[in-house]
Amino acid sequence: MNNQENNSKGKAPKPDRFQPKVLMIWGIIIFAIIALWMTNPTSNVAKNIMSIPEIILKAEQGVIVKGIIESDPSGGADWHVIRGTMKVDPSQQIIDPTNSLVNNSGTQSFQAEGKLTESNYDALRNAGLSEKRSSTMMKDILVGFLPFLLIIGLLYFLFTRQIKMAGKGAMSFGKSRAKMLTRDKDKVTFQDVAGCNEAKEEVSEIVDFLRDPKKFQDIGGRIPKGVLMVGPPGTGKTLLAKAVAGEADVPFFTISGSDFVEMFVGVGAARVRDMFEQGRKSAPCLIFIDEIDAVGRQRGAGLGGGNDEREQTLNSLLVEMDGFDGHEGVIIIAATNRPDVLDNALLRPGRFDRQVVIDLPDLEGRADILKVHAKKISLSESVDLTLVARNAPGFSGADLANLLNEGALIAARYGKKEVSMNEIDEAREKISFGRERRRLMDDEDRKLTAYHEAGHAIIQAVVDDGVLPVHKVTIIPRGQSLGSTMFVPKKDMLSYTKKRLTNQICCAMGGRAAEELVLGDISNGAAGDIKMATKIARNMVCDWGMSDLGLIAYGENQDHVFLGKEIARNQNYSEETAKSIDREIYLLIDTQYKRAIEILTLKMDSMHTLADGLLEYETLEGKHVHEILDHGQIQSEVHPTKREDKMEKPIAEEPPSNDTVKSVEKKDIDLGPDAAGLPAS
């Protein structure tokens, strides 16, 4: 009743701090120890061991105060044990005052055992000693075995308790680990989920069906047996499932796909069956399986063939979802970011009737997500969440939550009470490009980095069509890069034309071209640029049909064996075609490299001015780059760079040696379709 009252008040039930069963067991153990000690009450008293004749003599002298005569059948028919106390001679007590056998009253305890004749027995009786009934054999056996029983019981109690704590009991090894979500604890509703309106509409139909099934059944509709939520990491799949749990008035179980996987074959299948058994008892109910790709991968594929345990678990899941003995009223909601590795039998209608795609949010979705998370943060009135959303393309819901949290942490480190736009911009740069690292670069490295970044910025400012302008150029090391050229798209980049892709390759080649033109030498700083340009060029030739090889896809069979794909690979083009592909990729990159050299040759003065500005200010904004191109010099004010060592609570960072700086491979701009607007280092 107490737990129910706590749940009705919106509080989680408090766990029992001490179980009555444990208290009872410990009480029995303590009682047994006391009883064992009480069976021999005089065992802790020092005694004077005497012979039977001596006891008879003391009895005749009248010095025995009291005593007990007890028969002992173990020694024979006439064998007796005599215990009691007797008076001590005062003269003897003075001679030996340290005698521990003598107590403060001038008496001492004695004990004697042996055979008693009838005359001796009568003499002791006349001296005032009383008789005591001898102990039974059952009592002797009990007293003898009680210590062993006590030790065995204590060990059994400790071992069984340890086993239950470690593995929840040996008999529960195949039990499901699904947990019923408490509705009143950290309740999440659809109002807490933003940026995926279409996905909310899909899953809200399930909630409506559970609330009013008659509305759907009247026209012949049936509830979907399963909903698979697909999307990149951090887009809110698990959060949306929590919202379904918060909105639905039915039991909601949650479990991870990895909870089914064990080293013992058959355990996962048993847990699947037990999970559906729990769901059937609570039907109608919802069961959410997070990261279902851990158990639902394609069967019989991959390196080394199939996995017996995982495949048996998947087979059990398939049968339980839509087999001969299907379970009505148990709805499965699963989430994964790898739907391509799932088994086809798992994806068919009847098991997962509906696939809900939760993609990265657009501009409006990012703004809504920021508004949800901004409720918990003290933001300044100058913060424009729409502008923040515009400057964060490609950010997922988790990234946006982390963005505001990092801004709050930075503001706290500066000693501010509110988060302003400056802290949010700094947090965005820290998340996207890495934390500033004030490395000890000498003049040669700073000059090399300045011209490298100036080459990127000049070319992007020249070839840009207004969609991907230069946001900031810096020679301050961030992450693994020694410098960065940052871009902020004016809109979400949903598609890429051939012209924009070639412009991106040209911009990527700007750093290497600037090094060759100005310094007369090249460095390893363009390693990231070359990888990114090669990736774009290969996609243009093999996947997008943007070359003279025609509209043919040459990029098939690129799946990884370890992700549940087949080992066999069929080369669907000839060696001659492979040479042609390599030649087309080379021509694309080489053409744009020559184009970059031509642009920088024409804008040589602007590149020198921009490099000098970077050496002086370390960081310049995009407007300064355009001012140099248009007017030949920087006209607007340059705000000094905020050094992290000027914070209220600085974090000391040991600068690496020059050898370490030179050995770091710079990662240049990643202007590819997957990450437009990332830094050029």
Image (cartoon, rainbow, N blue to C red):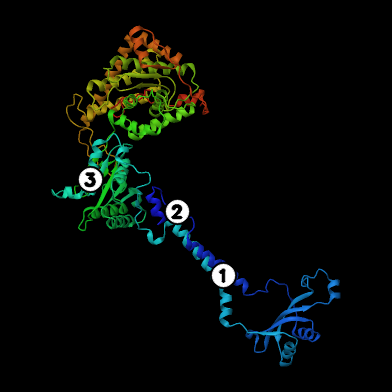
Can see residue 300? no
In x, y percent, where is residue 256? Answer: 34, 48
Q: Is residue 551 above or below residue 180?
A: above
Which mark is nearer the camera, 1 or 3? 3
Looking at the rendered structure, the kind of residue marked 2 is Pro
In x, y percent, where is residue 640? Answer: 45, 16
Q: Residues within 10 Å of mark 1 (few under 14, many from 20)?
A: some
Looking at the rendered structure, the kind of residue marked 3 is Asp
In x, y percent, where is residue 428? Answer: 38, 27
The Cα–Cα distance between marks 1 and 3, rounded to whole angstroms, is: 62 Å
Looking at the rendered structure, the kind of residue marked 1 is Ala
Please tell me which of labels 2 and 1 falls first in the chain: 2
Please tell me which of labels 2 and 3 falls first in the chain: 2
Residue beneath disc 2: 15
Q: Is residue 676 above or below residue 51?
A: above
Please tell me which of labels 1 and 3 falls first in the chain: 1
Q: Residue furthest left?
A: 219
Specify the label residue 32 is tagged with.
Answer: 1
Q: Identify the element where label 3 is drawn.
A: helix
Q: Identify the element where label 1 is drawn.
A: helix
Between 148 and 188, the residue placed more toward the observer is 188
Specify the label residue 208 is tagged with.
Answer: 3
